[in-house]
Amino acid sequence: MGNGQTSGTVGQSRAIEAIKLSLSGGLSDSYDIWYRVHSANVGWLGWASNGEPAGTQGYAYQIEAIQIKVLPKNAQDAPARGDAFRDHSQEPPTVSYRSHISNVGWMGVVADGKTSGVIDSRNAIEALSLSVNWYGHGGSISSRAHVSGIGWQSWSSGTVGTTGQSRSVESVQFKLNDEISATYDIWYRVYASKLGGWLGWTSNGSPAGSVGKGAAIQGIQVMLVEKGCSAPGDTANHFIGATDVLSGSSYGLNGNSLGTVQGKTILMGSESGSEPLTSLSISFDNQETSGSIGYSGCYEFSGWSGVVSDGAALNSKNDGRTLKAVRLTLTGDLSNAYDVWYRCFDSKKGWLGWACNGADAGATIPGSCLKAVEVRIISKGSGAPGVTDGAFVSDTSADCAHVVYQAHSASRGWFPSVLDGQDAGTTGKSLSLQALNVVLAGVDDDSLVEARAHVANIGWQEWRSAGYVGTVGQGLAIQALELRINGPLANQYDIYYRVHSAGYGWLGWAKNGDSAGTTGLNIQIEAVQIKLVAKGGNPGSSSAPAFISAPALTLQAHVATLGWMNPVGNGGVAGTTGRSLAIEALKLNVSSSVSGGIEYSAHVQDVGWQGWTSNGNVAGTVGCAKRIEALKIKLTGDLSNYFDVWYRAYCQDFGWLDWTSNGQPAGTSRIGCRVESVQVKIVPKGAGAPGSTARPFTDQPLLPADMMTMLNRANRYSSSTSWLIMVDRQACRLGVFRGQRGSWSYAQYWTCSTGAPSTPTPTGEYTVTGKGYSFGHGYTCYYYTQFYGDYLFHSIPYYQGTFNPMDSRMGMHVSQGCVRLPIDRAKWIWDNVPLATKVVIY
């Protein structure tokens, strides 16, 4: 910087950590400038001069004070040079670590070879935490521990071991990552009193400690050494137990674990097991030789996978793919020290020969799968452990095409694959098919199968040529399927398929992209058969349709005074309610992917049952003012084999009667009641009634004549509430109704007493306006409900202040104009009928 200019920052809260000062011009020829700084956490540093740095770099220590001297060149009293500048970026990396000790807890952090733990005691190390710091450089430490009662944990960049479980660490492995690993080795050793104290030093991922001895680590030392430098001490007996041991896990269909094995030889899966292998994971335990083990698999529905290594799963998805072949390789020093040999047990061929170091092992035979894989590591060049012939059997049927497919069913998951017309899925168990894998085999061109599924709550999915169709883990049934061949094979073969649908059984064969199954009916597929048939060939006879969709129904009613109403669809209501209008004629029609039709017959006023008519023709009469009183409906042809037709009638005085089906009568006869509305639903065969089926048809009056008379009168009136009271004063009858105008129904029907000839009960329309507990002089009446002036509904009279009846006569004209009732019935009105309710007395 020049004279008068600012160095540093202003307003950024950034501290100055180091400085350089120099003289310029002629001054620099005659004088030296000397300076030193006082840094936080350090104090005064040594003197520097003429542009040399003074302070620190990389520590975040700010300068707190400065001393400056300008002296003649080479002055005798010039300050002595010292440690003026400290550069953290030039310092070597530091490894720091701490241990969690039983009965003690976490100890303090130590570094660079110092001991962490409590040696010569019974206190074991239970957990460890390591970190590395190298200013200006990258790198980290990965750690792994063998813990009592648990075994080897996974590699971690954080804490290893356990706390709060009283489990001791018995062995450890550490390795450097990224930039630091190119320049330094990490060395470590452990103290185990049960094994004689300090074991030898080891480095870079090799195990230190023991396995299977029950010997807890009580102390540990860790340090970094530059590459190429010798070990910090004796390296003998750093680990007691087998090193470079294989560890393998295998998984069957639906991700089921088939167990974990260890040793120089491991067997994953079982030749006698029922589950095909879908995934493997292989790694080295107690690894002393650097390097990795890599492996890939050939799958039924997707071919060879990519290579994974060191414990990664070959297939972590629940997609039903089964293993058919494998390849294994070693890398690094492992490949120089060992050969990896492996052989496969195929479900059709049994044990195949041994393969080595990346060669293919297994079989790509259609419909077969691997049940077991055996792996051995053998010292380099020692030779095969057994017969090597026939290690890999390829599909030799390229001149004979096959279709291979695999079902995923509810509650069962993935099944083993089948081929060429075999059943995939279940029958008779009510388990829905939820996903399906399909692939061609024995094909030497680019032909493939494309598929799509109609799934509950989703509909038709997109076409797929790889991976399953349907869903997994969502509980959604496949309801229909479509398959087609894409490629040259389509010129030679048709792909045929049929499905087993719930309630219907096996439907007919579909082919080449046509639909198989059902839509719009919520019917699940439970099983499927797929086969290739040479062009012009026959897959087998079946009289059933391949695909069934929901029939389209139209229902139209001709109503008195209104004429033909607008048509309604499946489940719609044709006609009117609450208007006392008769249906005089009906027309029904149905269209469906299944052959057949609909027939119907009407019971007409003064005519009786008419003959059956069908498919849009008129049942009933038009222009004759004759009501329909009942009806019958049925399906015909194949439609009747796969669907039921349910229907019900809304009838005068009865309202909605119950449901009936398939040609049985609905409505009334011989009692002169009109049908006012009709509802019709077509449902899958055996799906059950849409509602109650107790009384769909009757030829008996619903109510006695007096009650029918009162109900018919009541339906002329509306009320401000959902209640209505009717009183027939001549017959001494009282009715309480619930509902609304045109559709009142009885809540109560009682005998009462009304006014004497000299004090008659008034007729007309009134409203409930008040209520009270009792009234009277010389007598007491209870629970009164007021409807007009002093006119009330109330109990019979009792002797004043008692419940001793004074006059309990009912069904007589004896009151002073009020309507008398037994006390419990007067109280019922008092409790239940609200104010503003209409009262009609006639």
Image: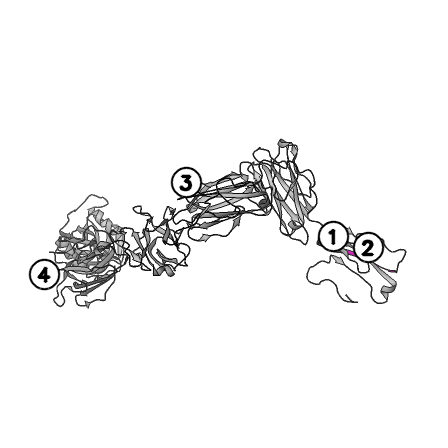
Viewer-proximal residue among 796 and 63 = 63
Quarter of the picture containing the N terminus is: bottom right
**Mark 1 Cα within 10 Å, few/some/many (few <14, many 20+)?**
some
The answer to whether 608 is drawn above or below residue 379 in the figure is: below
Viewer-proximal residue among 766 and 101 = 101
Among the two numbered marks 1 and 2 on one chain, the one whose residue lies closer to the N terminus: 1
Residue 42 among magenta residues: no
Label number found at residue 47: 2
Viewer-proximal residue among 514 and 473 = 514
Q: Which residue is mark 3?
A: 273
Q: Which residue is mark 4?
A: 607
Q: CA distance from mark 2 to mark 3?
A: 80 Å
Residue 68 among magenta residues: yes
Q: CA distance from mark 4 to mark 2?
A: 128 Å
Q: Which residue is mark 1?
A: 40
Q: Which residues are magenta?
A: 65-90
Say what secondary structure mark 4 lies in: loop
The answer to whether 356 appears left or right of 466 in the picture is right
Label number found at residue 115: none
Q: Disc 2 or disc 3, which is closer to the eye?
A: 3
Q: CA distance from mark 1 to mark 4?
A: 115 Å
**Disc 4 and disc 2 in contact, CB within 8 angstroms:** no
Say what secondary structure mark 1 lies in: loop
Outermost residue on the front side: it is 389
Say what secondary structure mark 3 lies in: loop
Among the two numbered marks 2 and 3 on one chain, the one whose residue lies closer to the N terminus: 2
Quarter of the picture containing the C terminus is: bottom left
Say what secondary structure mark 2 lies in: loop
Q: CA distance from mark 1 to mark 3?
A: 71 Å
Q: Kindly identify the amino acid type of the residue bearing the numbered disc 2.
A: Trp
**Mark 3 Cα within 10 Å, few/some/many (few <14, many 20+)?**
few
